[in-house]
Amino acid sequence: MTESSPLLAVRDLAVSFGATTAVKQVSFTLERGQTLALVGESGSGKSVSALSILQLLPYPHARHPGGSIRLRGEELIGASPTRLREVRGNQIAMVFQEPMTSLNPLHSIEKQIGETLWLHKGLTGAALRARIVELLDVVGLPDAAHRLNALPHELSGGQRQRVMIAMALANDPDILIADEPTTALDVTIQAQILKLLKALQARLGMAILFITHDLSIVRKMADRVCVMQAGLVVESGTVAELFANPQHPYTRQLLAAEPRGEPPPESDDAPEVMAGDGVKVWFPLKRGLFGRAVDYVKAVDGVSVQVREGQTLGVVGESGSGKTTLGLALLRLLSSKGAIRFQGQRIDDLSGKTLRPLRKAMQIVFQDPYGSLSPRLSVGEIIEEGLRVHGLAGDRAARRAWIAGALEEVGLDPDTQDRYPHEFSGGQRQRIAIARALALQPRLLVLDEPTSALDVSVQAQIVDLLRELQRRHRLAYIFISHDLRVVRALANRLLVMKNGQIVEAGPARRVFDSPRHPYTQALLAAALNLEATGNGAVSI
């Protein structure tokens, strides 16, 4: 490597899968100690470009029709398997989006981190164990020396991601590729991981290639940025230049994609749709031969809520706070204690058969539309199922017309009802899930993280759609999320949950403008500023 050559140079990179070209003439450089962000929506070619650097694409299905990838001047495209094994995990390491699927569920964290140290450094015995503990201490895993035998499922999401980072740092790499490393994490944990990466970079001097679709993260993390669309780099430059003066229409679209606007105004005299008083969901911890309950997991512990017609109640908190459990309990999809009213009627003591006629009026939309839509049914059959169960819309011709109307309401072509879920994008599948709920003409929608799996521009579209549907039909929403930027654009009132209890509640604007509880302050700081102050400080 000459004095002036970059640490990593990608020139005119092309990647094709059969007849499909996924990446076209992508070029960028990365210097030691620098952070370069590759930004774009799903399908833009970000991850394919990153995987090409380590030659991890599924050959022979993936090919490089052209281009060059040079590490310190050495060409990696076409390098021997032996040389690539020396580079992977040693000179270039990678942290993936979902640590639970990246870690082996059957091996302890000690074994998984130790494997890369043994392969590249030849460490064994006490020296190996000491280095593993040192790495886990560096990434801030609590009580590292006593958790070496832990399996991945015994750690939280943030702890698993710390283990992945420790594994990536094991051999002091020159380059760390971070592929959406915080997307699956709560906002406070996200802030901790990002601060950790910045601190480690400053300490070790490594370069970071950061792949994301979230421009708020780019602003905090990166020095330079490349914006990708349809396999092309459409704009590149310093972060300051790009945010101050974006040139390409797609970059401007991404910058404007954050959910904005205000929720429809609420009315204090609007009729109550759903309410819960002292709702409890306790799961017993059983031990012994006879399975006696020795303690309880208090997932929801004495929570009271109310939502009115045309109003959105936002329920926020980290994973495990009880948000989803509360929503399922209010819909009587989980057993609970405490009074639950729907449109003035007590429903907590109704049998399943008595409750069934009411179910069409209270519907739920789940986080992952691909998982909640049957792949074996067409879109029309998925929506028709509820119509048939509740005896709506008469004969088949009438039902098809009803389904067409539901699809039109959510902005989809009614002629697509004979297609299958896999033929649609993530945003379109979420629209289908909303259409399925709307077809039954509900009064209440429980929306459980309905935008967290979507790109930012698609998130904004779904938020606009939900606001319009609420205005049109005076729907009541219970909107469950850990993304406070989305909640701010939708909610009239806010509940903040922690450990199964409400720690703060009130009008959404008041909670956002002047949060009173330290936990709320930490959530807002992590979600909106990516740094926290005061009692809820985020630290590493």
Image (tube, rainbow, N blue to C red):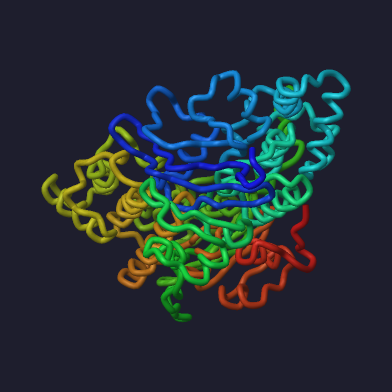
Left or right placement of residue 294 versus residue 441 in this view: right
Q: Residue at x 40, y 56 (%)?
A: 234
Q: Nearer the viewer, residue 444 or 263?
A: 263
Left or right placement of residue 213 versus residue 301 in this view: left
Q: Which quarter of the figure has residue 465?
A: bottom left
Q: Residue at x 82, y 24 (%)?
A: 128
Q: Nearer the viewer, residue 82 or 229?
A: 82
Number of on-image labels: 0
Q: Position of residue 525 (x, y in %)?
A: 67, 66
Residue 510 visible to an observer of this rendering: yes
Q: Nearer the viewer, residue 222 or 381?
A: 222
Q: Residue most toward the left?
A: 397
Q: Position of residue 387 (x, y in %)?
A: 25, 48
Q: Position of residue 31 (x, y in %)?
A: 63, 48
Q: Nearer the viewer, residue 100 or 176?
A: 176
Using the image, determine if residue 420 lies above or below residue 230: above
Q: Residue at x 29, y 46 (%)?
A: 386
Left or right placement of residue 426 versus residue 5 in this view: left
Residue 448 visible to an observer of this rendering: no
Q: Position of residue 430 (x, y in %)?
A: 37, 51
Q: Residue at x 62, y 52 (%)?
A: 35
Q: From the image, which quarter does the N terminus lie in? A: top right
